[in-house]
Image (cartoon, grey):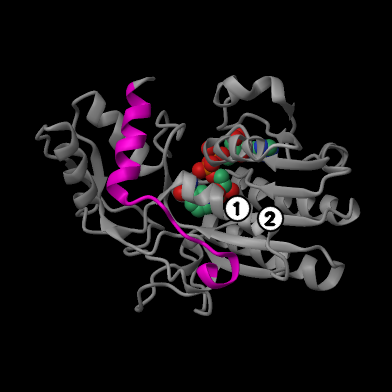
């Protein structure tokens, strides 16, 4: 029986991935999570089928014990926020860099067959050219971007120096069910969803014309599964976006139309470390991994909104 370990599996993307792994059947699913920003309730309906190791990825011994015997490890645990890495850089450095090193080291020791690492489109920074392609020189603009990029470099080096099969996926603004809207550091679409349901104006930092490649979480977990299983891609880095880009103003307009309301947003000062535009070139992921996003932004927004309304 295959054994899958998901670090950060009680978080937003992790809990969706756990459901996908269980859906494929025939495998054991383990989660490593210290519940820093994840929640046990994200796994509520599948809790009896999952082994939850409540531990911190900075604890090497704990991680090594939890990944022993794993076939595939998907490393999602992180403090995933650009502004948080600026306001409080030490924990984010320790978790995103030292924690990632621990996970890779433990996986190499345990001879895990494949590790999928959650890299970030923030590594690109502001580039003159769109869409952003993996061959571009990264230009990280925040501690978070440096940390995620370093994890990616480490994943590559663990492949070349220690023979660990790693695949890094650069996620681009993922949204969907169970994204936590409760903090100032939450993803923008989760904050939009909450504001819309509460019939409040959201705050947009900057003029709202910044663009993002919003990717629905089910498309991301489908790609993670491919990255975990497709042969011959060890050591590689792929964009995991949808290939489109929409401004924050456009997305808020779409949400208002879906709900049939008119609520002008508030605008705040632009935030340091944020990139202006983001859009993935998905050619390599389509070619090598069979990436095939299924959800348009409108479909993803409707599904996500329907879920938030049940909460
Ligand atoms: N959501 C996005 O748009 C996006 C974009 C690019 C990259 N990513 C990356 O994807 C991954 C998952 O992000 P998410 O959006 O699901 O965020 P999330 O905050 O919902 O999930 C992160 C999980 O990691 C756990 N965690 C944090 N510190 C830990 C530690 N020290 N030890 C063990 N567990 C710890 C949290 O409790 C949480 O469950 C992160 O690595 C993030 O950097 C996300």
**136 or 223: which is nearer to us?**
223
Secondary structure beneath disc 2?
Answer: helix
Within-10-Å neighbours for mark 1: few <14, some 14–19, many 20+: many
Image coordinates for residue 302, horizontal then vertical, percent: 29, 37
The quarter of the picture where residue 95 lies is top right
Decide: few, some or many residues near mark 2? Use Cα within 10 Å; few <14, some 14-19, many ≥20: many
Q: Give the range drawn in magenta.
A: 285-309
Q: Do the residues labelled 2 and 1 touch (CB within 8 Å)?
A: yes
Q: Residue at x 59, y 71 (%)?
A: 288
In the image, residue 202 sits, relative to residue 125, either above or below, namely: above
Q: Is residue 182 visible?
A: yes
Question: Which residue is found at the position 48% from the left and 59% from the top?
Answer: 142
Residue 278 x %, y %: 37, 64
Return the residue at label 1: 224
- Which quadrant does the C terminus fall into? top left
At mark 1, the secondary structure is helix
Residue shown at 42%/66% (left/top)?
280
Q: Is the magenta stretch mostly helix, strand or loop?
A: helix
Asked if ligand 1 lies within 8 A of label 1, the reply is no
Image quarter for residue 28?
A: top right
Image x and y of residue 199, in percent: 18, 26
Residue occupying the point 38% across, 57% down: 274
In the rendered structure, find residue 228 and report the number of the disc placed on it.
Answer: 2
Specify whether residue 308 is painted magenta.
yes
């Amino acid at each position: 029986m295959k054994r899958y370990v998901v670090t950060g599996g009680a978080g937003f993307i992790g809990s969706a991935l756990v459901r996908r792994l269980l859906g494929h059947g025939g495998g054991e699913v383990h989660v490593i999570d210290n519940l820093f920003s994840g929640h046990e309730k994200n796994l509520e309906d599948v809790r009896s089928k999952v082994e939850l190791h409540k531990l911190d990825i900075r604890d090497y011994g704990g991680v090594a014990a939890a990944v022993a015997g794993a076939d595939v490890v998907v490393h999602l645990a992180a403090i995933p926020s650009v502004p948080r890495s600026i306001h409080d850089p030490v924990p984010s450095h320790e978790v995103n860099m030292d924690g990632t090193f621990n996970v890779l080291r433990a996986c190499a020791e345990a001879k895990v067959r494949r590790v999928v690492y959650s890299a970030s489109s923030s590594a690109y920074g502001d580039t003159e050219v769109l869409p952003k392609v993996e061959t571009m020189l990264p230009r990280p603009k925040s501690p978070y971007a440096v940390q995620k990029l370093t994890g990616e470099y480490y994943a590559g080096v663990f492949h070349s120096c220690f023979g660990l099969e790693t695949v890094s996926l650069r996620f681009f603004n993922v949204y969907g069910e169970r994204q936590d809207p409760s903090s100032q550091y939450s993803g923008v679409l989760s904050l939009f969803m909450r504001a819309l349901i509460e019939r409040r104006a959201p705050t947009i930092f900057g003029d709202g014309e910044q663009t993002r490649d919003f990717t629905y979480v089910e498309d991301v977990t489908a790609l993670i599964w491919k990255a975990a299983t497709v042969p011959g891609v060890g050591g590689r880095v792929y964009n995991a976006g949808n290939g489109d880009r929409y401004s924050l103003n456009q997305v808020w307009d779409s949400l208002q139309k879906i709900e049939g309301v008119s609520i002008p947003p508030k605008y705040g000062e632009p935030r340091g470390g944020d990139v202006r535009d983001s859009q993935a070139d998905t050619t390599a992921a389509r070619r090598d991994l069979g990436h095939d996003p299924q959800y348009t932004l409108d479909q993803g927004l409707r599904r996500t909104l329907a879920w938030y309304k049940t909460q």
